[in-house]
Image (cartoon, grey):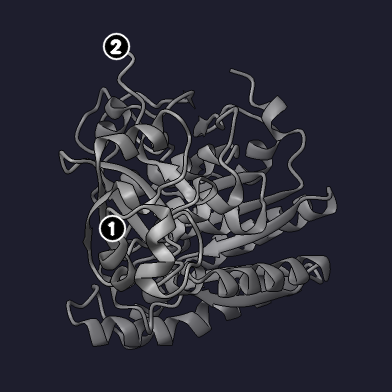
Amino acid sequence: MDRKPYLKKVKRAVVKIGSGVLTRKNGLNLNLIDDITTEICKLRKKGIEIILVSSGAIAAGLKKAGLSRRPDSLSQMQALAAMGQSSLIMAYEEAFARHAAQCAQILLTRDDLTHRRRYLNARNTLITLLSWGIIPIINENDTVVVDEIKFGDNDNLSAMVTNLTGSQFLVNLTNIDGLYDSDPRHDKNARLIKFVDKIDRKLSRAAGSIPGFLGTGGMASKLAAAKNVSLGGVPSVIASGLNPGVLKEIFAGKIIGTFFKPREIPLNSKKQWIAFTKSPSGEITIDGGAEKALLTNGKSLLPSGIVKVLGRFSMGSAVVLKNGAGKDIAVGLVNYSSDDLQQIKGARTSAIETILGYKHDDEVIHRDNLVPTSMLADEPDLD
């Protein structure tokens, strides 16, 4: 399958570099950083803006602390991230300076992107840096975020940054050649999958989730990131960052790594944010009539269709919608708090103001702020 048509219009791309690429067991791979920054500067001369999402802070901290392996203690992990981040950004600064280029460090948490105003502020900062010709280098702020250090990963962050910045391509550089039909570490007959039209359950099962020595994300998280951006109409590739000239070959449309075709009719940016960035704060169970209205007729959720409300959340929070069988059917942004919904569930729209003393909206969740789970699920197996 020819990749070149998908890359013709790419003027802004996110390049994610994993710890397995950036680091050795004794610290940062400075030669590789120099090679990657050289390639990025060549792409910029061709008019392609690059945003880096870079792992490596904890790995760099290991060398500074004189440790041979990642510790189990959360506080030690956070300390390593704090120690290593300065070394990581300094290595990038020195490498880019050799090409008379500048970079800027941005540390983000999922919480920064969950709140719409902060999400837009982060976007404005990134767009400003790009307009100044500066390469943004983004990493998770591991020193303050518990969940990201335990089981988060920069694959997910790279997909969020792609959506955030309106980038047209995501490149995920790892320490293996791409996605295989089975784990190549254990199966000598494993076959590299060069092109993915749709992500089905079989493909998801094939993606291994065993992290490397220094990283936190496995192939499953890389597949999830590819799926995320694909739903937004953005192609992506997973390839080995250890191969010299890898970025040049990828952007030239060469058959390298695993290429993921984008969805032809994409979700808009706000629905992507709802689906992938804003963490749900509660659950709403709806009746059969409301389920049909939402999923078949494309209607909004009214209070009359609500059966049960779980969790505590405020207006504007994301919640999961469930049907009577307990199945997740959608995620959306609510116009009323959980306390208010406990009072108006099952009521007609005309009764909202009488019950609450005010009425914010007729709809509990407007259809423009609702994403059916079926749009996010894996495609059925093709065989």
In the rendered image, the vertical position of residue 101 relative to residue 64, given as above or below: above
Q: Is residue 337 visible?
A: no
Q: Name the image quarter holding residue 94.
A: bottom right
Three-letter residue code for mark 1: Lys
Residue ID for mark 2: 383
Which label sits in the foreground, 2 or 1? Answer: 1
Three-letter residue code for mark 2: Asp
Image location (x, y in percent) of residue 293: 40, 35
Q: Secondary structure at mark 2?
A: loop
Q: Secondary structure at mark 1?
A: loop
86 or 228, which lies in front?
A: 228
Seen at 25% across and 75% down, the residue is: 68
Q: Which mark is residue 109?
A: none
288 or 116, which lies in front?
A: 288
Seen at 35% across and 54% down, the residue is: 303
Image location (x, y in percent) of residue 61: 38, 81
In the rendered image, the vertical position of residue 8 relative to residue 270, given as above or below: above
Residue ID for mark 1: 345
Outermost residue, top side: 383
74 or 257, which lies in front?
A: 74
Crowd around label 1: few <14 · some 14–19 · many ≥20 (10 Å):
many
Q: Tell me if 237 is positioned left or right of 207 in this view.
A: right
Crowd around label 2: few <14 · some 14–19 · many ≥20 (10 Å):
few
Q: Is residue 284 visible?
A: yes
Q: Label 2 vs label 1: CA separation?
A: 43 Å
* Position of the C terminus by quadrant: top left
* Position of the N terminus by quadrant: top right
Q: Tell me if 263 is positioned left or right of 228 in this view.
A: right
278 or 57, which lies in front?
A: 278
Image location (x, y in percent) of residue 291: 32, 37
Seen at 54% across and 47% down, the residue is: 368
| Callout 2–callout 1 Cβ contact below 8 Å | no
